[in-house]
Image (cartoon, helix red, strand yellow):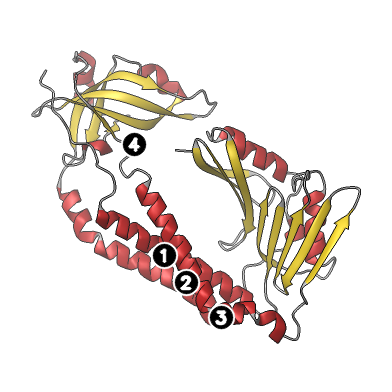
Amino acid sequence: MTTATVAPPTGAAPLDLARGFLTGGVIGASLAAFVVGCTLGRVALIVAGPALLAAYALLFRLAGAPRRAREGALAPLTALAVIDGREMPTVEETDVPVRFDLTVAPDLAPAFRIRITQNVHVSELTDHRPGTVLVVRYPPDRPWLLRIVRRPTPEWEDRAAGAVLEPASGPVVVADSQDGCAWSLTTLLGVLLGAAAVVLLMRTELFGKDTEAPTARPVTSSSTSTSTFSVTATVTSSTTGTVAFGPGRSVLDRGVLREAVESLAGGGDGRQALTVVVREQLLTVVFAPDGVSAPAFDPRSLPFDRLPALVDEAGTTLGVDAPRTWQLSAERLAGALTIRIGVTGAGGSASLEADGQGAVVRRSPAR
């Protein structure tokens, strides 16, 4: 069996990096415009943020239409492949992400080796052992997008059953690291710079609002020490409140977060929040400005008793080795109240989403 050397993806090209930077800038500017508009009560900014993001998404799709047309004109190739090896985590899930080392043997081209990661149902793991011949499909110009065909046609199923393939030698195309980290870092830089640009443009109104608005709450700073926890609470404006917790205390300690939220929400006056952000020793609440219609919620309605368990689940079940930081955010911009928990560690980043009752609705494991 002749072996071909397939050129692996070489990482993000300069054009891809520029596109990632521009995308990040638009996302950062849109989100910052929406938040700043809610803070200042500027309807134009509130509308401009999502409108800018929607317009960019439309232009991005239109610009990529010729490329998608060229790629769609090439019919995918179907071939046989033998499993040289596999690795899978010890997780108790229905679909297990398995890393396969495959030798692919096309009918009219030399064989090549490739490494992919694909989810496999636990009931099908026995059918994906090393030495098993499978049917695969991939674009002829992008073999690193290869996928295992779960239900091949009877013809290919018969060919796979009677085929004998030997593992090939040569380099392995690693399909799981097309872009590397350069694209992600460039996009993150764009997000930060886009958000900073909006804040700088609106800095006069944003940071001068407390002294000009007659109804704004004055800046206050107080230290409170109780039998439960110690905090330094600072209210920066009538629409933003923060609580910083003292050393040795965590926002996840029993009753701490509930009491802190109630202290910022003002008791029974029913202040509605746009966003609640929680870290290990910091709570931030962005309240809805008076007279502005926005998708807000009562921060006191959060499922406080479920939050510590959700944070623990995000840090232990999503494949993030040695998690270092976590952040919990609650908002209802999409309609229903959504709680998102992101964790970052040596194994990458992962996130978990829950509804207003604390029930998990989506998991995004580390990759």
Q: Position of residue 64 (x, y in %)?
A: 25, 59
Q: Position of residue 284 (x, y in %)?
A: 69, 60
Residue that badge 2 annotates: 197
Give the CA separation, mark 1 to mark 2. Answer: 9 Å
Q: Which mark is residue 25?
A: 1
Image coords of residue 107 (percent x, y):
11, 26
Say if mark 4 contacts mark 3, CB within 8 Å.
Answer: no
Q: Are marks 2 and 4 in contact (CB under 8 Å)?
A: no
Q: Nearer the viewer, mark 1 or mark 2?
A: 2
At label 2, which amino acid type do we have? Ala
Location of the N terminus (image quadrant): top left
Q: Please identify, in this view, whether the residue under mark 4 or under mark 3 is nearer the observer.
A: 4
Q: Amino acid at mark 1?
A: Gly
Left or right of 314? Residue 284 is right
Labelled pair 1, 2 in contact (Cβ < 8 Å): yes
Badge 1 or badge 3: first in the primary sequence: 1
Return the x and y of residue 106 as percentages of the image width and height.
Answer: 14, 27
Residue underneath mark 3: 43
- Residue at the (15%, 50%) spot, across then down: 73
Distance Cα–Cα, label 3 vs label 2:
19 Å
- First in sequence: mark 1 vs mark 2: 1
Q: Quadrant of residue 236?
A: bottom right
* Residue shown at the point (51%, 23%) measured from the top left: 90
Residue 176 circle label:
4
Asked where in the image residue 273 lies, by quadrant, the reply is bottom right
3 vs 2, front mark: 2
Q: Nearer the viewer, mark 1 or mark 3?
A: 1
Q: Is residue 334 left or right of residue 54?
A: right
